[in-house]
Amino acid sequence: MDIIRIDTANRRDVKRFLDFPFDLYRNVPQWVPPFAHEARAMLDRRKHPFYQHSDADFFLALQADRVVGRLAVLENRRYNDYNHTREAFFYLFESENDVAISRGLFDAATTWARARGLTAIIGPKGFSALDGFGLLVKGFEHRPALGIPYNPAYYPDLLEDAGFEKVTDIVSGYLDAHNLNFPDKIHQLSALVQKRRGLRIARFKTRRDLRRIIGPLKKMYNDTVSGTEGNVPLTDDEVNAIAQQLLLFADPKLIKIVMKDDELVGFLFAYPDVSAAVQRTKGRLWPFGWIDLLLELRRTDWVNINGAGIVEKYRGGGGTAILFSEMEKSVVEGGFRHADLVQIGMDNDKMQRE
């Protein structure tokens, strides 16, 4: 078996790297591919904003010139500076069920990291705040929300064999809209906190409305991640790239912003689940995939709630109740039958308490 570092300027190498999951998950109905243009962008050193401040490389495992595994390893210098660490990330790991493959890939990643003076490897963790992170360890029978990782059940064993240990748990939850009925005290507390602190909920009608708040959203997001371990403030170009991703399938009515006068102090992001369309089109928007995507936006009865936060000074004293109250309103008012509440850290004590 050979482990090779691919040339991201070589179209054949990039294609082999991106195509491998389609072979691996060929008979797995739960797997949802990424959008093809977003997957390609991760390997584009000229266009992806990550490469303005950081670096990454991509490895393939080959047996008789057949791809049997892949891995990306990243040095996010802004993350390390902000968190006072010297860590590499691994991401985009895929492998057949063979420890020789995973060992070879992670040995290459370890050599890469050590050559840069990095002392640990963590992951799966990607290029931007929108990239799903972590490893699926339970719930393999369910189709994940768009952008949330899915992997075979044997991956935890491969990672443990490579020397990795669990750092924390991240959970996702299912909400049945027919039975969704948060306690009245949640809504009462939300109303009380809004009144006492002079807060209000901003709502939006069009994508143009959403584009106007991209700048203030960046400031608010960076304020909400301050003091939270394992995050990093976003650059202007990173915010613009993320905004383009979100606006692709956003329903403005499902984006809620908590305001204090003219200042953004909290957010709740929910999105119609278009996973079924992405599966049908294999993640390709062109030439006709975008039509299927638009149709799915109208007919889906699933919603993904994936992104919520309040700046630190409003987190205590019931501030999170505003998010839960608006969460129920988004599901019910949108006419959805199912909701996925995705990727909440088990160490998010404040959110769990409230």
Image (cartoon, helix red, strand yellow):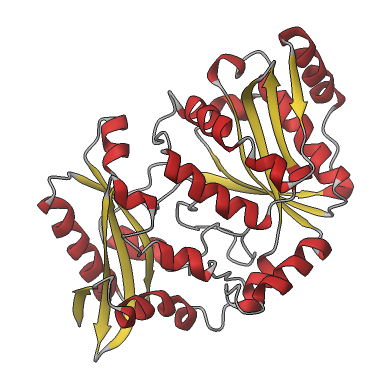
**In the displayed structure, would residue 282 be above or below residue 191?**
below
Quadrant location of the N terminus in the rendered image: bottom left
Between 89 and 13, which is closer to the camera in this rendering? 13
Residue 275 percent across, percent down from the top left: 66, 66
Q: Give the total of numbered labels.
A: 0
Q: What residue is rendered at 38% in x and 79% in y? A: 15
**In the displayed structure, would residue 221 be above or below residue 192?**
below
Q: Residue furthest top?
A: 196
- The picture quadrant where one finds residue 161 is bottom left
Between 30 and 83, which is closer to the camera in this rendering? 83
Q: What residue is rendered at 37% in x and 65% in y? A: 93
- Is residue 181 visible from the viewing direction of this image? yes
- The picture quadrant where one finds residue 269 is top right
Residue 270 percent across, percent down from the top left: 70, 46
Between 39 and 150, which is closer to the camera in this rendering? 39
Q: Residue furthest bottom?
A: 64
**In the displayed structure, would residue 51 be above or below residue 69?**
above
Q: Is residue 118 left or right of residue 346?
A: left
Residue 55 percent across, percent down from the top left: 25, 53
**In the displayed structure, would residue 66 be above or below residue 203?**
below
Q: In this view, does 259 lie to the left or right of 51?
A: right
Q: What residue is rendered at 42% in x and 63% in y? A: 41
Between 225 and 168, which is closer to the camera in this rendering? 225
Residue 354 percent across, percent down from the top left: 67, 24
Q: Is residue 172 left or right of residue 86?
A: right
- Is residue 122 visible from the viewing direction of this image? no
